[in-house]
Image (cartoon, rainbow, N blue to C red):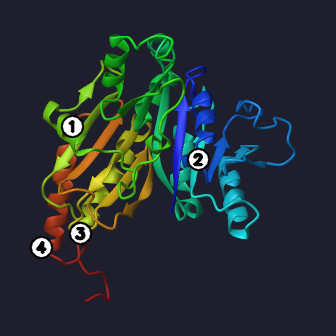
Amino acid sequence: MIPVAVLTGFLGSGKTTLLSRLLRSPQFSRTAVIINELGEVGLDHELVETSEESFVELSTGCLCCTVRSDLVLTLEDLLRRRDAGTVPAFERVAIETSGLADPAPILHALMGDARLAARLGLAGVAATVDAVNGLATLAGRPEAVKQVALADRLVLTKTDLAPAHPALHARLAALNPAARLITASFGAIDPAELFPPAGDGGAGLGADTAARLARNGGHSHGEEVACFALVREAPIRAVALTLLLEALAEHLGAGLLRLKGLVNVAESPDRPAVVHGVQHVFHPPAWLERWPSADRRTRLVLIGFGLRLDWVEALLAALEAEVEEAHADPRPLLPPGPGRR
């Protein structure tokens, strides 16, 4: 499975500068970078805006391209060329979104296309936040709010110009307390910050974060974005998990900005399932080879509009009770029809 990281952030927040620095890092070699900016490539002098070739190989070993038409087609073409040996055998993919983009459709493309989902796995979403102008941007631009709410990692940029105001830290914590906050020094961060370590499965969910959210009952900022963790000690049957995800997608739809986490599935206690969802689209669960720590509880972080922890807990409890009842009484739910025994 090839990990994919999505880099988002509002216009002028420094994501192109960040990506440009990453491309010069030896640790970022063997990475395919997709710029989702139609007609606009801003990676200094290293890429040619009018190049006829879709893919440009850099001296550091990175492979860069722009989305000329459709992201799914671009990714499929990239994978075909990798298989044919006409481009370097990249080990990861980074996608930079437009500054005005809603990142959700990109995540939908990764999760909803079966051919891509079989080979590409979401490693996480990083959003750049301007330490100088970020507070005003979040106050006036709903796109920036959604970019922050969907992220696993928040990267504070331009702190060399001015330290981030405490009010900005408070605003980010209110919008997405589950996200990890990273400070970029002069536009540079450790490339490993964009990709979780092996075995994390891209969940982006630390046990401390889940425990804190659970203790506090989550967090919401007015009528905007709510964020909380659903933590369960007992394993969850696979069918109950499937019904839960279906119910959340049906009842919350676009209001569920993000769901992510680790699930202790009763039928596979030694291999946790990694679950990712964006709005009504859920990625097929991925299975880790082993638990990343001694903590084997189910930990699901939900971020979205109008979410209530007690409603989700009651929904899961009702579904588990129904599944247990059906498991205890395996008789058909419907009486036999004519000719049936």
Residue depicted at x 47% and y 10%: 136
Up the image or down, 175 lies above or below 76; here it is above
The answer to whether the residues at label 1 and label 4 have Cβ atoms under 8 Å apart is: no
| Residue underneath mark 4 | 328
Question: Viewer-proximal residue, 13 or 151?
Answer: 13
Residue depicted at x 26% and y 81%: 336
User: Residue 148: x and y, percent?
Assistant: 44, 28
For the residue labelled by badge 1, is the local secondary structure a helix, a strand or a loop? helix
Mark 2 or 1, nearer chain start: 2
Which circle, 3 or 4, is nearer the viewer? 3
Q: CA distance from mark 1 to mark 4?
A: 28 Å
| Residue underneath mark 1 | 309
Which circle, 1 or 3, is nearer the viewer? 3
| Residue underneath mark 2 | 26
Q: CA distance from mark 3 to mark 2?
A: 36 Å
| Residue underneath mark 3 | 270
The disc at residue 200 is: none
Q: Amino acid at mark 2?
A: Pro
Q: Amino acid at mark 4?
A: Ala
Disc 2: CA contacts within 10 A as few (<14), some (14-19) or many (>=20): few
Mark 1 or 4, nearer chain start: 1
